[in-house]
Image (cartoon, coloured by chain):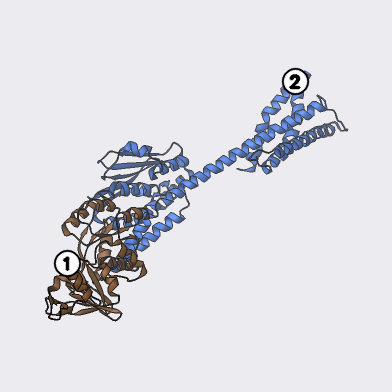
């Protein structure tokens, strides 16, 4: 957030207070609106200026858990100081305007001091509310990061152990194939460990998925058939990292792995206007779709949650299946609403022309 | 070495490379013969009951049926070594009487320990302390001897042994053709042999009853065992008394 934006917010926040004080002065002193507004401005201006110090003070004094009396005492002292400083500052402004020293507060010193304390409590209250909001935002950001971490961890360890077993067994039988499988496995592992971005291009995701599929194809042998239909223009579309892999892994683990017969997996991706539509279909054992929709902690569920963090209501993951009828997952993610996504795509189009 | 003395083995795994790799590793083991493969649980049950292997390398996560379920459903009960990437089935596996639990990935190094255990289970007493487990796991009487010949290990069916003879710290296992030296005591051996077929007839002799033609008493009253191959073994006085007891 820029510095100017912060000042504007501060000014806007104090506006209703200014209006309130103006109204009070008009009603109590029967003065003209203009005079009342100017009088209130000096009160509120002084309060706002000193309020900056209060804001800084509260950000240093974290809200105590558990609550402590010392915290209240500190703020009572601070409120007294604030209030006194406020009264002095108002008098100082008056003195400067009038050209001679003046110490006369409208409603008297007692009421002024109480008003000062009241203002202090307002400022401190807003400050703490703001801090809490920031903390929540940080927690949410952390949660999104955790989602990515969890998603990443679902690849190991059994995929890794089985893939390593394949490599070990291949070494004496076909050393060349063993070396290739090792490269693919290392590539897959590197991506899962190092990919930090929430959104990547379909092309990047596909590079990852290809390696993953190569290893799984060795393991499944002729029990797995894969068909790919990808629009070239869709390669630069953005989607959540590991999204396609999650869908494919789901098809392999739940559709193909339990079957003795060959399972066909069809992967397709098209760009439909401002939407990327990626589809993973299999003719495996299928499942009761209601079980999938209500299941907790599945890869699909985690992907959905992550999509909600990343796109709000603008992206969808549609699932269709029934027992013995295979499984179809359709990922629909917007491209236009994401500024960096558009930037990347424009860049891509330019290089094509 | 006869082919029959080798341990007949079945490989069960849903992954073709895993099966090929196991077959490749076992091909270098002189005392094992692979008699088949199965790629899923249902096929495994069929193959085990049809081929009646003595040993099965059994994957756990397979389409159709878990390896642990396979073991519950077969009629023929072979010795089983589970192979899996999942550690959490180990307890179930050993409850089912598995001989070993190979965690993927594994190569020849880890397999070697399993092979030692397999030999212990089939009849090689006291290879190392580790293989006490294999020995303990095996409820069946010894069916094989594994004799080291140069760098290789040769399996000998116990049925082919005519008699064991204590020679100093060693035992000589006599077949009709040859004899093999084993580094263990006659007392250790006696405990692992099938008592219905092998009899301790002397402080230094255990004889295979299937190879005895007749027990004969000579004029001095001492008893000897006349073997089918023409050889005669002395029976000690104490054992002769036992024999007479059996005869009556």
Task: Between label 2 and label 1, give the one nearer the viewer.
Answer: 1
What residue appears at the point 18 percent right and 59 percent down from the top-left corner?
Answer: B52
Q: Which residue does the image show at 67% across and 29% down from the upper left?
A: A15
Identify by letter the chain in brown: B
User: At 24% from the left edge and 78% from the top edge, which residue is drawn?
Assistant: B204
**Is label 2 in contact with label 1 (beta carbons under 8 Å)?**
no
* For residue B235, above or below residue A113: below
Give me the chain that's blue.
A
Tell me where residue B194 appears, x and y as whole percent.
Answer: 22, 66
- Against A158, residue A100 (above or below) is above
Q: Quadrant of residue B135?
A: bottom left
Secondary structure at numbered mark 2 = helix
The numbered mark at residue A26 is 2
The foreground one among A62 and B154 is B154
- Chain to which the residue tagged by mark 2 belongs: A
User: Which residue is at 21% across, 60% downward?
Assistant: B37
- The spot of residue A117 in percent (x, y) is 75, 31
Q: CA distance from mark 2 to mark 1?
A: 129 Å
Looking at the picture, tell me which residue is in the foreground, B29 or B129. Answer: B129
Residue for badge 1: B246
């Amino acid at each position: 957030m820029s510095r100017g934006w912060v000042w504007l917010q501060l000014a806007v926040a104090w506006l209703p207070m200014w209006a309130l004080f103006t109204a009070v002065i008009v009603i109590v002193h029967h003065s003209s609106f203009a005079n009342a507004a100017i009088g209130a401005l000096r009160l509120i201006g002084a309060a706002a200026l000193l309020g900056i110090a209060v804001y800084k003070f509260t950000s240093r004094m974290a809200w105590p858990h558990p609550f402590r009396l010392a915290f209240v005492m500190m703020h009572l002292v601070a409120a007294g100081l604030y209030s006194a400083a406020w009264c002095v500052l108002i008098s100082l402004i008056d003195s400067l305007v009038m050209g001679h020293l003046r110490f006369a507060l409208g409603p008297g010193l007692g009421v002024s001091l109480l008003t000062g304390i009241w203002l202090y409590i307002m400022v401190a209250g807003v400050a703490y509310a703001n801090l809490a909001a920031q903390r929540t935002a940080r927690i949410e950001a952390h949660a999104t990061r955790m989602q990515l971490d969890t998603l990443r961890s679902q690849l190991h360890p059994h995929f890794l152990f089985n893939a390593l077993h394949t490599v070990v067994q291949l070494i004496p039988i076909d050393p060349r194939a063993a070396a290739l499988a090792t490269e693919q496995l290392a590539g897959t592992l590197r991506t899962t460990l190092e990919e930090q971005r929430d959104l990547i291009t379909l092309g990047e995701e596909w590079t990852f998925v290809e390696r993953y599929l190569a290893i799984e194809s060795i393991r499944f042998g002729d029990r797995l058939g894969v068909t790919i239909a990808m629009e070239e223009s869709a390669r630069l579309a953005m989607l959540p990292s590991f999204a396609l892999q999650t869908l494919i892994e789901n098809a392999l683990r739940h559709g193909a792995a339990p079957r003795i017969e060959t399972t066909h997996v069809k992967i397709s991706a098209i760009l439909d206007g401002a939407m990327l539509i990626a589809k993973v279909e299999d003719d495996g054992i299928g499942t009761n779709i209601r079980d999938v929709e209500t299941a907790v902690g599945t890869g699909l569920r985690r992907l959905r949650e992550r999509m909600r963090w990343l796109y709000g209501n603008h992206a969808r993951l549609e699932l269709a299946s029934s027992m013995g009828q295979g499984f179809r997952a359709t990922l629909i993610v917007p491209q236009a609403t994401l500024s960096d996504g558009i930037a990347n795509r424009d860049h891509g189009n330019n290089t094509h022309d | 070495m006869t082919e029959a003395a080798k341990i007949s083995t079945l490989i069960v795994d849903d992954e073709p490379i895993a099966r090929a790799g196991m077959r490749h590793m076992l091909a270098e083991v002189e005392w094992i013969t692979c008699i088949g493969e199965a790629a899923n649980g249902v096929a495994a049950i069929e193959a085990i009951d049809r081929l009646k292997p003595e040993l099965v390398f059994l994957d756990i996560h397979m389409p159709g049926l878990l390896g642990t379920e396979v073991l519950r459903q077969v009629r023929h009960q072979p010795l089983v070594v589970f192979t899996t990437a999942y550690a959490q089935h180990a307890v179930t596996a050993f409850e089912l009487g598995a001989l070993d639990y190979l965690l993927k990935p594994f190569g020849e190094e880890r397999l070697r320990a399993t092979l030692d255990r397999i030999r212990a289970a089939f009849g090689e007493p006291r290879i190392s302390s580790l293989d006490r487990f294999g020995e303990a796991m095996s409820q069946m009487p010894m069916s094989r001897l594994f004799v080291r010949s140069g760098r290789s290990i040769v399996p000998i069916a116990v049925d082919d042994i005519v008699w064991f003879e204590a020679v100093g710290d060693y035992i000589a296992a006599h077949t009709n053709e040859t004899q093999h030296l084993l580094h263990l005591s006659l007392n250790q051996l006696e405990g692992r042999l099938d008592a219905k077929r092998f009899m301790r007839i002397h402080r230094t002799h255990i004889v295979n009853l299937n190879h005895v033609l007749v027990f004969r008493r000579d004029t001095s009253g001492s008893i000897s065992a006349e073997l089918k191959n023409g050889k005669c073994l002395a029976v000690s006085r104490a054992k002769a008394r036992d024999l007479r007891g059996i005869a009556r």
